[in-house]
Image (cartoon, rainbow, N blue to C red):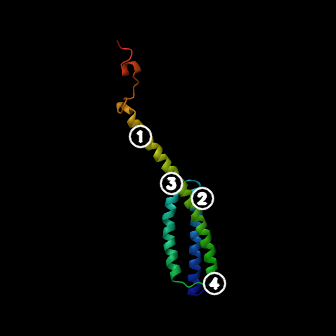
Amino acid sequence: MTSAREAASEAVIDGYQDLLERSKRMLALAREADWSALVDQEAGYVQQVARVAELDAQHAPTNGERQRKAELLEAILENDREVRRHLVQRRDELGELIGTAQRRRDLQQAYGAGGRGAGSGRVLPAASRFGQGAS
């Protein structure tokens, strides 16, 4: 039979192991660029972080537990760094796409998409435009 202290220790370590597994799944989703699934996973991850923090605050770990927790945290943080790197890369890609779309819209507005803008999308002969060739 395990004591309440041992059960609490096990719950804390199990919580960190669950966080590690969740962070691995999130990293796999980031590598696959499955952004909607990543966002869905993140909600559960945040809830688990809160549960583990609450359990951890109520428990004084032994040296061995501290060491195991440190190992798990190191792995979790490494996964988190890589997920963030993928997210920053995606943010930059989206920024470029937005910039391209804005430039395209501005060009369409300026050069006559649908009859608007300075030239209304039609080509005029230079002679008629500048009065040359007309007698």
Q: Position of residue 94 (x, y in %)?
A: 49, 50
**Residue 98 higher or lower than 38, as above or below:** above
Task: Determine the CA span between mark 4 and mark 2.
Answer: 32 Å
Q: Which mark is residue 63?
A: 4
Q: Amino acid at mark 4?
A: Asn
**Local crowd size for mark 4, using a 10 Å CA cut-off: few (<14), some (14–19), many (≥20):** few
Alpha carbon distance from label 1 to label 3 = 21 Å
Amino acid type at mark 2: Ala
Mark 3 or mark 4: whose residue is earlier in sequence = 4
Cα–Cα span, label 2 and label 3 = 18 Å
> How far is disc 3 from disc 4 in space, using C-alphas?
41 Å
> Does the CB distance between marks 1 and 4 fall below 8 Å?
no
Residue 77 badge: none
Q: Which mark is residue 105?
A: 1
In which quadrant of the rendered image does the N terminus lie?
Answer: bottom right
In this view, the mark in front (2 or 3): 3
Q: Earlier in the sequence, mark 2 or mark 3?
A: 2
Q: Which residue is rendered at x = 56% and y = 53% of the image?
A: 33
Name the residue that disc number 2 marks. Answer: 28
1 or 4: tag closer to the N-terminus:
4
